Image (cartoon, rainbow, N blue to C red):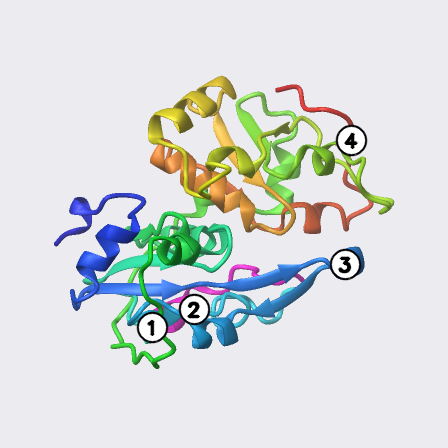
Amino acid sequence: MSSNELPSPVDSAWLEAHLGDPNVVVVDATTHLSFPDGKPAIESGEQSYRAAHIEGAVFADLLTDFADHDAAAPWTVPSSEQFAAAAGALGIGDGAIVVIYDQHDGYWATRLWWHLRFEGFDSAVVLDGGLPAWQASGRAVTDAESTPTARTFTGVRRPELIRSTEDVAAALDDPNTILVNVLDPASYRGDNSDAPRRGHIPGSVNLPVSEIRDSETGELKSVDQLRTLFTEAGLLDTDRTVVTYCGGGIAATGVAHALALAGRDDVAVYDGSMSAWSSNPDLPLVTGPSPR
């Protein structure tokens, strides 16, 4: 099977049928993020993975192995060398077909999907609906240990798929760049926070990441539905550059992934997102509804 034969995203039936393929590497990318007392609490998903995962799946720790340890913010992109070593140790590399899932709403999975593409690896897909959909369909999970077969990861970075704070600031007056805030409308407007720095980056439009999924099943809307959504928002206009952002660079990858399914695979992600932007008092923020 080649990467060209992969459905994207894959569903639980497809994955179950291919679990025995030695070139199919299943990756659990779960991370836990909660907001007790309104402050973010971040925890590795490793214990949850060990308790229950898809048979044969390996665990990718996005907080440690796939992040820059010296960066101020969690999940910051590390060096290509660190990424290649971490990916290769899990069996992600030359000749592999990678299927990624998480135990939440899928955006940890899309974060790793985006990161793989950023590092030049295209043979990765996301399990639609993640572990919740897998279990809802009656398929089994296990706590049995999985031992990866290491591979060599080779790839060339695609710098056009990422933006820094400086890049975003420089493009504020560029009419050919669309900044897309994927947070909920209240967060976008800035009316649900007591923080002194709230709101959104000037000129950005609001397309909540929740709009790309079916509210009942948690699975992605159809490609036709996604295309309609993105066309109405002006995001499929290839004459314009699309940059997505959120709170910390996770949910933004969910919309980038959905846009790729709809035919727009050149979308960039602002890695630092609002965590980085709002921490700099010299950078502007505005409040109010989206012009979209």
Residue at mark 3 to residue at mark 2: CA–CA distance: 25 Å
The amino acid type of the residue labelled 2 equals Ala
Quadrant where the C terminus is found in the figure: top right
Neighbor class of circle 4 (other Cα within 10 Å; few <14, some 14-19, many 20+) is some
Residue at position x 55%, y 51% in the image? 250
The reply to whether residue 203 is in sight is: yes
The amino acid type of the residue labelled 3 equals Lys
Residue at mark 4 to residue at mark 3: CA–CA distance: 22 Å
The reply to whether residue 270 is in sight is: no
Q: Position of residue 275 (x, y in %)?
A: 69, 51
Q: Position of residue 286 (x, y in %)?
A: 78, 31
Q: Earlier in the sequence, mark 1 or mark 2?
A: 2
Neighbor class of circle 2 (other Cα within 10 Å; few <14, some 14-19, many 20+) is many
Residue 38 sits in which quadrant?
Answer: bottom right
Mark 3: secondary structure: loop
Which disc is residue 74 wearing?
none
Neighbor class of circle 3 (other Cα within 10 Å; few <14, some 14-19, many 20+) is few
Which disc is residue 286 wearing?
4
The residue pinned by badge 1 equals: 90
Q: Is residue 86 magenta?
A: yes
Q: Nearer the viewer, mark 4 or mark 3?
A: 3
Q: Position of residue 165 (x, y in %)?
A: 64, 45
**Nearest the eye: 122 or 258:** 258
